[in-house]
Amino acid sequence: MDAVQSISTNYRCSDGIVTVNWEQVSEATSYRADAIDGNGTVLSCFSILDTCDIPIATCGETYQVQVTAFSGECQSTSNIPTSFDTVPCPPSELMTYRECSSNLIVFSWAPTNNTFYYVAKSVDLNGREVECVTVDTSCFFTDTDCGQSYQFTLYSVSDCNSGTSSPKHVRTAPCLPQNIITSVDCASDSLITTWDLSAGALFYMVEANGTKERNYNCSSQNNSCTIPGVACGDSLSVWITARDHECITEKVLGEAAETAPCPPDQVQAFRDCAANQALIVWQSYQKSGFYVASMEDQDGGWLSCNTTNSNSCNISQLRCGQKYSVTVTHTDGICPSTSAPITMDAEPCPPTNLSSVINCSSGSTLLSWSPSPNAVSYSGKVVGPNGAVLSCNTSTTSCVLGTVVCGEEYNLTVSASDGTCVSSYSAPLLQESAPCAPVNVVTLLNCNTNILMVSWDAGPKPLNYSATAWAEDGTAVSCNVTNTTCSLAGLHCGQQYNVTVMASYGSCSGPNSSPQLVQTGAYPLASCIPQNVTGNMTCRTHNIVASWSSAPGANSYVTMVMGPNGYSASCNTTSLSCPFTGLQCASQYDISVMSQGGSCNSSVSQIYSMTTAPCDPVNVSYALKCGTDIVTVSWDASSGAVAYSVFAQVGSSAQVTSCTTNTTSCQLSPLSCGQEYNVTVLADNGLCHSTGETITMVMTAPCPPTGLASSLNCGTDSATLSWTPVPNALGYMANATSTDGQQAWCSSANNASCKLTGLHCGETYSVTAITEGNQCASGPSASLNFTTAPCAPTMVIPHYNCSSNTALVNWTGRWAASPSWLSWIEGTSETTAALQAPAAPSLTCTVATHTT
């Protein structure tokens, strides 16, 4: 048996299944495909066709593929090398290196097998992604931000991509501190420094350097630090650095700090709402000096401004909603002196704790918030992506905003007013309106599992989605996800489904998408596999018409017929039957049917087997038994036959002679003489007989002649026989038997007559004739009797009576039935006399003479 040739593989990255295809071997009845890895581990699949699938779960491996063909106890294995690579393994041994000064991050890993290149990705806390594609085993990430946490992942790329590695997290060095403010508490001789928290910082170091060459420092884990024991009247330079466990920032210079002079009086504060600042005015009894106006809020926070030789300054960046205690400190180089405090209310803070409830049906929004100190009224606002603004005003802590468009993201904000100043708007509350119906819904049915994959375009923000498939039979399946794909399992075979997707967030659901029609297939549910597969055979032509019952959901069918010697044929049809022609006689054929519906095929039906009509008998011969009208017909045994029928027919006549047998010969009897018969031998298997296309011509023995007649030739002892010509005669022979036992013969090749000679006189002959054919002569014809001429008398003795002029004649004679005798006396004188003698047996008569 030949080895399998032309092996090819198709490895699917998505599910790790390799499909092996090969060229079929004519003698093979089944095949086994083997995939062998580098360790010799073998994975196999079996098939009677020219393809099969092997599931492979191992990543990063190269497999060698060979195919073995089987036929009975024989097998042959391909020797043509074929290989394929599986999906690379996810990279491992991930390592990161961070450089504090530049925030450079080096990401490295161990190499993987079967890899063309690697794709490394960083994602910060804001979702910003950066990719690095390289053939090396490391990537340099330079575009990083301070104080940021990064997650690094990696996958390998080949013909298939590997899975993503486990994540690796790295933080960059802290950001520089901002908005550094330093004040001196002369009463306690303390230096107080505040700043904005720096991203990534775990703690801070503050250094203060005075003009009196005195240095101070402190550390803190929050945004303020107090250095006690600072002398008054000093001018201090303040530096701050932010740190984590590994990195330290550069020093950032803050505002200079001065000790407080004597306290001013008649302090007044005037609020400027637009600039969010306060003008502090005072009276000072000192002609010169450095003044610091300070504002302390209810939370202990400080704001200040300073001036030289002036009695006013502006303090900006007031904290909203605060009741400030305002003081002015005059620094005279020894210790600050602080005025008696006065109070001032800052503008209201933007409202906090915003919440909203959307009315999904009307599209309106109820906005609410916590009250702001000092506020007497509020203004709410919603801003859409196209700049459209909806607003509301109220003295309470809630209001209703009008209808918005579906699927849009809106910023909801609120401002507060104390009658004089209006706060800035609150931090926006992001809200989506009721989701729009998902678009670009795509369905993909997995025919092997009957699982429907549904995908759609994502909305502008993360949403919850519900996909539902409604079947014609009223059943439904659904799935709920937060991404844009989901799997619908438990589908019924052969059903048309309407698939819709609905988006929602919170308790608000949008409308359904436009329905997508999906026709499920039959696999693996048996109810959709074609049933009642059968076949009807046309015995004479060896044609088979396969038929089956309709399968639910089937649009078309594929019918397959497998026969001997590797024969296979298929037929695609939308009907419930398919013809197959040109089949071999006396052969078993296996019929199976697979339904096709939508994009899926069913599994193959149960096999229906049937055997074609027996082959026509060959080497048909016959033996003619001459003279009996019996013909013995014989032939070689026919494949698939259990009995035989022999038919003999002359031309198209209705008269047929037949015989049946379970052996290889049969006698036909009786047949008519002189006929050319068409003899047909049919083989029968109990259901069908053979085609009867083999016809043998049989010529029976010729018929006996008819119309036999004779004509005597009296003077020559002969007789001419004649008869009616017989068709197809090659010649004739006549036989005459006399009463005295004589046998006489005559024959003719072309004429319907012959002459019998040498006959005995006075004898009665019984005559029959036969016709000579190619193989046999006919039987004898009906007999004909005739009598030859009488014999001449012998021993004739005359006795003359002269007186009476008469003569008495005596003779010896033979006679036929009842002859009469005539005698003559002849004289020289021409005198004749004749006398009719009496009938035999008298052998005498008297002849009177008469002379002329």
Image (spheres, rainbow, N blue to C red):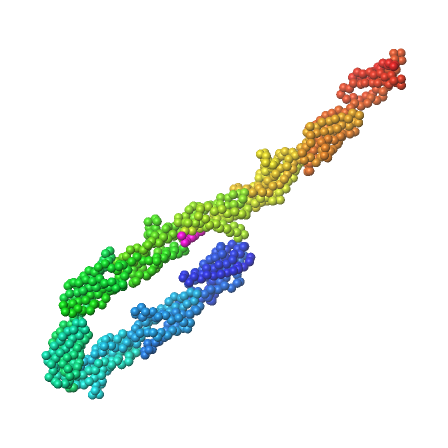
Q: Is residue 716 above or below residue 534?
A: above
Percent x, y of residue 821: 80, 18
Q: Main SS type for the magenta part?
A: loop
Query: In percent of the image, x 27 and y 81: which residue is there?
Result: 251
Side (left or right) of 115 relative to 499: right
Q: Is residue 837 above or below residue 569?
A: above
Percent x, y of residue 310: 15, 82
Percent x, y of residue 197: 24, 75
**Rendered-image quadrant of the N terminus:** bottom right
Q: Please report the bounds of the magenta region as a residue range.
A: 598-605
Looking at the image, which residue sits at the far top? Answer: 803
Query: In percent of the image, x 33 and y 54: which residue is there?
Result: 514
Query: In percent of the image, x 17 and y 74: which residue is there?
Result: 277
Q: Is residue 626 above or below residue 432?
A: above
Indicate the quadrant where residue 677 lies: top right
**Rendered-image quadrant of the C terminus:** top right
Indicate the quadrant where residue 146 lies: bottom left
Q: Nearer the viewer, residue 605 or 705?
A: 705
Percent x, y of residue 67: 50, 60
Q: Is residue 437 visible?
A: yes
Side (left or right) of 243 relative to 612: left
Question: Does residue 30 show up magenta in the picture?
Answer: no
Q: Is residue 92 visible?
A: no
Query: In percent of the image, x 37 and y 51: which residue is there?
Result: 496
Side (left or right) of 807 relative to 446: right
